Amino acid sequence: MIGLLLRDLRLAVRAGGGFGLGLAFFLIVVVLVPLGVGPKADLLALIAPGILWVAALLACLLSLDRIFALDHEDGSLDLLATAPIPLEGVVTIKALAHWLTTGLPLTLASPLFGLLLHLPGPAYPWLMVSLGLGTPALSVIGTFGAALTVGLKRGGLLLSLLVLPLYVPTLIFGAEAVRRGAEGLSATTPLVLLAAITLGSIAALPFGSAAALRINLR
Amino acid sequence: MELRVTDLACARGGLPVLEGVSFALAAGRALILRGPNGVGKTTLLRTLAGLQPALEGSVSHPPETIAYAAHADGLKATLSVAENLAFWARIFGTGDIAPALDRMHLRDLADRPAQNLSAGQKRRLGLARLLVTGRPIWMLDEPTVSLDTASVALFGAVVREHLAGGGLALMATHIDLGLDEAEVLELSRFRADPRRAADVFDHGFDEAFL
Amino acid sequence: MTSIWEYANPKKFMQTSGRFLPWIAGLAALCMVGGLIWGFFFTPNDYKQGSTVKILFIHVPSAMIAINGWGMMLVASLIWVVRRHHVSALAAKAAAPVGMVMTLVALITGAIWGEPMWGTWWAWDPRLTSFLILFLFYLGYIALWQAIDNPDTAADLTSVLCMVGSVFAFLSRFAVDFWNQGLHQGASISLDGRDDMANVFLFPLLTCMLGWVLFFLTLVLLRTRTEIRARRLKALIARERMG
């Protein structure tokens, strides 16, 4: 299992853009928004929590189709399915690797992007906590979507269509936590709900992902 | 150690292609699957390897004993030969890759990225993967594609050693590897009967309703 | 006693559904036309909302079918996963576009109703938003069916999606409620005996709802029959090729 994780991380680093691509996309969205809505600091501060969360979500979405597609093309997925690791373990590790290469860097870099959008001071800790709690759910749910569409030729667009509705609760609770933080209110309730969704997804969805993979491989 | 297949039927893309396949393979023996393109060699191997469910019949072998090698070698272009092999060794919990590298004459290429290998070298690496799995039943789909004569001979020798060590091999190939231990199974006689090969929408269906 | 699963046999299903379909369709037309005429012309105008309120006779039943259509797909998917009855998988496939259109009808009639009442065509109200999200779920489900060639694989994968999607749709509903308390009124009909709606509106509405249910049933049966014929055709073509 650790071997699989290390290989995926090494591949992400070597292929170039494993870590960088998501962050660069995040940066571009954050730069484009003020260009689109105008430079007023108070307006940007108002919408910053939502923009940051939507940008993080799209950055996660960007790299989802690579989770299984490359392994499917070169046959590794068939070989992994006959290996002694249960497929549920494989998908969990894949999701973890995806989170380590997209969700975690986004979480760590988010204060910087918050600065660009004039995010109010008290919101910063909540931004990092909510992204840290919420992005694992994005990776796990995304892995499920990737498992559903792995064998399809034009899977990329379909993958977005399938995964985005599933992201709704995570997005709502995540952005709500930051918004409440920005207004100086207590953000505990949305954070607890966000954590519940993340934990529930991690506990249950790998079974769905593994089932989808098995169906797609046969 | 025995692989026993009883009255197996398998499907490709939802359509039955083979039925009534039965054979038993004991330790130290090899079976070569023959038959024209599209007869279902790959489908049979995938079914036996557990990648797809059988329509009917049963496959019995001790658990976790099958090493499957498909057309694709499952190599990562950006990883070196040694890294590719070490990954699979770790997944299968065997660890040491040195004997496999030596056996398949890959020692000199160990640090080269897989993307810089020739097709034949990639294939040798793919076969070296079988050695590091440490599993006794090899299921090989066209293992000799893009190998030169010397490599085919090398591969034949490796398979023979594997069999001598109590292993089994099942392969779909058209090349004569010179294996005395091998029997040949002609698959075209198991071709599924199109009349019997009916799914639920083609079985006892009265045309009057359509 | 015959088991209910007997009707999951495609042949038996075609036989039985063919016999009942005209009656169900006729009854659906009767209830819908009757309910709508009763509702539109024989009920008084609301003292606040005027005649605009009468769009509820389309809006409410459509919304009901939109939600319960997904529920029916979930049940059919579960039956397919557990018992592998092909008809069940095809019924789920057949219901999806009907449910999606009903969702759209509920959204559009809601917009038409909302404009004079709230002064806006669209508001990010929890109920409206939930329906928009439900629409996206339908869209994804249908797109997945369309994308996969092998019918059994498609049935399996869409069933998995339907089950996971149901959980997330439920969560979304809850999340959206949390996100915004809205303009939309609460449910007007409930079984707790405390009637929020005058009987003069209630009875035509119930007739419409019955009509919509039968209409949904008619469309799903028709579409399932078409899907079965399509599968039958596919099986015949495949056999032709092999033989």
Image: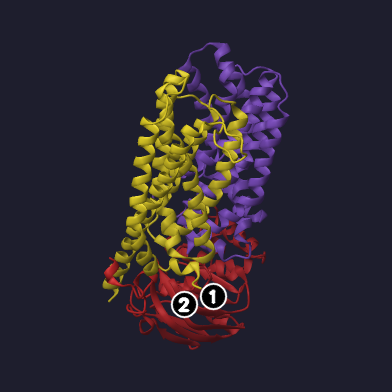
The chain displayed yellow equals C
Pointer 1 or 2: first along the chain: 1
Residue at image coords 63%, 46%: A201
Q: Give the image location of residue A12, x and y in percent.
A: 56, 45
Residue at image coords 49%, 75%: B155
Q: Quadrant of the N terminus of chain A?
A: bottom right
**Amino acid found under the numbered disc labelled 1:** Trp
Disc 1 to disc 2: CB gap under 8 Å: yes
Residue at image coords 42%, 56%: C91
Give the colour in which the image draws chain A: purple
Q: Give the image location of residue B165, x and y in percent.
A: 61, 82
C100 and C32: which is toward the camera: C32
B126 and C170: which is toward the camera: C170
Tell me the crowding category of disc 2: few under 14, some 14 to 19, or many 20 or more residues within 10 angstroms, Cα based.
Answer: many
Say whether residue B31 is left or right of residue B209: right
Subunit that carries the residue with mark 2 = B
Q: Looking at the image, is A11 positioned above or below residue B208?
A: above
Say whether residue C137 is left or right of residue A11: left
Give the colour in which the image draws chain B: red
Distance of label 1 from label 2 (alpha carbons)? 8 Å
Q: Give the image location of residue B158, x and y in percent.
A: 54, 77
C156 and C222: which is toward the camera: C222
Q: Which residue is mark 2?
A: B171
Q: Circle 1 sits in a helix, a strand or a loop, which is it?
A: strand
Q: Which residue is mark 1?
A: B138
Q: Give the image location of residue B170, x and y in percent.
A: 49, 79
Q: Is residue C234 visible?
A: yes
